[in-house]
Image (tube, rainbow, N blue to C red):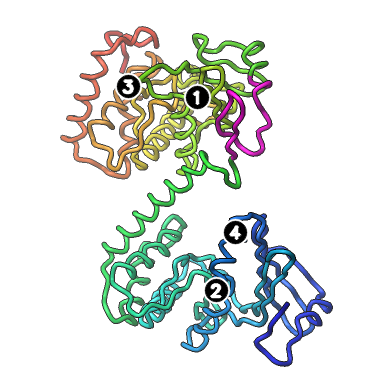
Amino acid sequence: MTASRFADFAFDSMLAGVTQCKIVKYSDKRQVFYLQAPCGEFFLKRSLLVRSKDRLRHLFFPRRRWAEWRNLHQLQAARIAAAVPVSKGEKKGVHLEGFFLLTRKVDGNPLTYDSLTVAKRLGQYVASLHSRDVYHADLHPGNIIIKSNGQPCLIDAQEVFFLPWLPRRLRVYNLGKLYFHIYSKPHPESWPVEFLGGYNEAGKRHLTLHELLRAADRHQHSHYRSRAKRCCKNSTEFVVVKGKGFQGYKRKDFRWGPQELRQALQKGRIVKHRRVITFKDVCIKIHQRQFFHRDRCLASWKMSRAMEVRGIPVPRSLGYFAIDGNRFFLSEYLANSMTLNDYLSSLTSEQKKRRALKKLASWLKEIHGHHIWQRDFKSSNVLCRNDNYQMVDLDGVKICRHLPEKNRIVNLAQLNASVSNAIAIRDRLRFYYYYTAAERPPRQQRRAIYRKVWAITTGKNTSAYGLDITKLQL
């Protein structure tokens, strides 16, 4: 069953005359197709109700089915630039199986971040939405097209709401969500200033840059949390596994089950004190859960995903299983890798050593920039392969709201105490210089931190790493 906005438009005739069809987006529940026909260019959005709870939701809330169709009509009536709806339809069997929406293609280009003019016009466009009390709950650059005349245009209106009144809190939240998707992309420093200037110029009530940046930061933390939690749910990447005496989580593309795990435990090679083994390019961490003890393997599974969504390099997590009273964390085994101490000690060229220390400092700075604290940050918990660093033993990692300076100093001291005499004093000082390159602290402050780092270093047992502070060379 189909319905068209225009009397002279026949959906079946258009579909029969399609000369080009291209998939833009594809998933189990929703697909988007680009269609080219003699009568024009279109986008077809098809939603499939494959799950019983989706069919039940649309049975009780049938108006949500055509929410985008109504929203696009209301945006057109309010003279807000948006895609033109052309046709809609649904497919029914015993139950509703799916529905579709057809819109005309908007001539233009995706949103770019190199033009300050576009930034200002985008701010003016969002202000035009807010001045009409329109709230878009899914406002991001992928839903906006810039026309040839520079006018932004909305192409996805599924989550648009027309409110009787739009409070300041929602306006800040909306702007922050849009800018959150932008500030991680390369753009001029004055981009947010121009964007907010355009918004304040066209809007009724002014917002500050501080409000915008704080809202974007909150959206980033919310984004990280939501993406990280998916590792413990059925999602596009992960699946929950359950069986008699066997449960856990794993990636959908990882085929191991109880039999493969038991085979690995019998034939695997021991790497560390019978707590870590490897088998067929899989590294298995074993933890026997005890009363009042936290599950270290589950903590490693969650933290691996949390660091992955933040872009911090770690071995790819594969699964977490609880079986036979034990807990197991499975990850990719990094063949031909070296511990950080072995890697730095093997560098004989001064130029290569400096390059490696600079890269290590940038890597550690990025970790601390995400407020990540490794409570056991020793060189044996950092692996190097192909000149790239990856953190392992993740059950001691904690993500804080704010990482205090004393925790940073502890990490620097742990790293300093776990590398051998092959790294001279000048190399250690040079590493800290690289670490603070962006901050440029005054000399007095640097020396105070040096003293704290060395005070912690001298209190540790460093013989296991080949470090004798009394024989350390300049």
Say if 273 sits above or below 346 in the image.
above
> Residue 402: where, in percent of width, then height?
27, 42
Q: Is residue 347 visible?
A: no
Type of amino acid under label 2: Arg
Q: Classify residue 454 as left or right of residue 393.
A: left
The answer to the question of whether label 1 and label 3 lie on touching residues, with beta carbons closer than 8 A, is: no
Q: How far apart are marks 2 and 4 (CA)?
A: 14 Å
Tell whether position 460 is magenta. no
Q: How far apart are marks 1 and 3 (CA)?
A: 15 Å
Residue at 62% from the left image edge and 81% from the top image edge: 85
Type of amino acid under label 4: Asp
The answer to the question of whether label 3 and label 4 lie on touching residues, with beta carbons closer than 8 A, is: no
Q: Which mark is residue 383?
A: 1
For label 2, the residue is 63
Residue at 22% from the left image edge and 41% from the top image edge: 441
Residue at 21% from the left image edge and 30% from the top image edge: 449
Q: Distance between the residues labelled 2 and 1?
A: 54 Å
Secondary structure at badge 4 equals helix
Type of amino acid under label 1: Leu
For label 3, the residue is 414
For label 4, the residue is 54
